[in-house]
Image: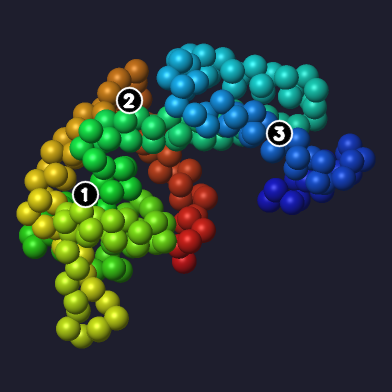
Amino acid sequence: MFKRTSAEWERRAGRPSVAIYLDIKILYVKLCEDDRTGAPMARRTEGEDDDRIDRLLAEWRAERPELDAAAMAVVGRLLSIGRRLEARANAVLRPLGLHYTDLDVLATLRRGGRPYRRTPTELRDSVLITSGAMTACLDRLERDGLITRIADPNDRRSSAAALTGEGRKLIDKAIAVRFAEAADSLSGLSAAEGARLAALLKKLGRTLGPPADEP
C-alpha cells in the first residue's frame, strides 16, 4: 500500500519516491529525538507532547500540503505513548528488580494457574515480547531463581518453564503494582472511553497482522 502511494506522489510531485519516504522518516525522527533519555520525558507533560505533534503536523501541511498527515496524527501519538507507557512500567517495577519483559513472562506463568508451568510454545503464544527476547529473559529469570526449567521427557531438546516459590511471591506483588500503574495511566479517560479505545486498538492490531517475528 505504501509503495503505491509513493508512486502516486512521484507522479504528482515529479520527485523520486525515496525523497517522499525520507520526508515521512523526518517526521518520525522529530517525534523520537526528545524521547531517547528519561530527563526530557520527565519534564514534558502529555499536553505539551500533543501540542508538539500538532505543531509538527501543521508544519508538514504547510510545507507539503499534498501529503495526507491524518494517519501520522495517530501513528505518531501511538509511537510516543508506547515509549512513555514502557518507561512508566519500568519505573514502578525497578524497585522490585524487574523489567517489564520479566514481568510479562512471570505473569504468563502465574495466570495459567497450578502448576504455574508453560511449554516454550505456550509462552510464545502468550507473551508480548519477541522469541529472542523471551529466551534471554528466561535465562535471566532462571539465574535469579524465579523460574526453573523442567525437561520434557518426550523431547530432550525442549524444556518447560515453571515458577519457583520465590518467583510466585514476586509476581503476585509485582502484578498488583503493574495493574495499579496501568489504571493510573488511563485516569484521564472515562471507563467508556477506555473501553472504546481498547476496542479500536484491537481492531488496529488485527489490520496490522502479527509482529514480524511471528508466523
Query: Of circles 3 and 2, which is in front?
Result: 3
Q: CA distance from mark 3 to mark 2?
A: 29 Å
On the question of residue 112 being in view, the answer is no
**Mark 1 or 2, nearer chain start:** 1
Position of 17 with respect to 94 (left or right) is: right
Q: CA distance from mark 1 to mark 2?
A: 20 Å
- Could you say where residue 169 lies in the image, as x and y percent from the top left? 9, 46
Q: CA distance from mark 1 to mark 3?
A: 38 Å
- Give the numbered dot on residue 62: none
**Mark 3 lies on residue:** 26
**Mark 2 lies on residue:** 185
Q: Secondary structure at mark 2?
A: helix
- Give the numbered dot on residue 107: 1
Q: Amino acid at mark 3?
A: Ile
Position of 204 with respect to 6 (left or right) is: left
**Mark 1 or 3, nearer chain start:** 3
Count of picture labels: 3
Quarter residue 69 falls in: top right
User: Which residue is found at the position 34% from the left and 21% from the top?
Assistant: 189
Q: Nearer the viewer, residue 148 or 210?
A: 148
Position of 124 relative to 193 (above/below): below
**Mark 3 or 2, nearer chain start:** 3
Q: Amino acid at mark 1?
A: Ala
Q: Nearer the viewer, residue 201 or 169?
A: 169
Q: Residue furthest front?
A: 143
Q: Secondary structure at mark 3?
A: helix
Question: Crowding near pointer 2: few (<14 within 10 Å), some, many (20+)?
Answer: some
User: Which residue is found at the position 69% from the left and 38% from the top?
Assistant: 25
Position of 61 relative to 4 (above/below): above
Position of 26 relative to 184 (above/below): below
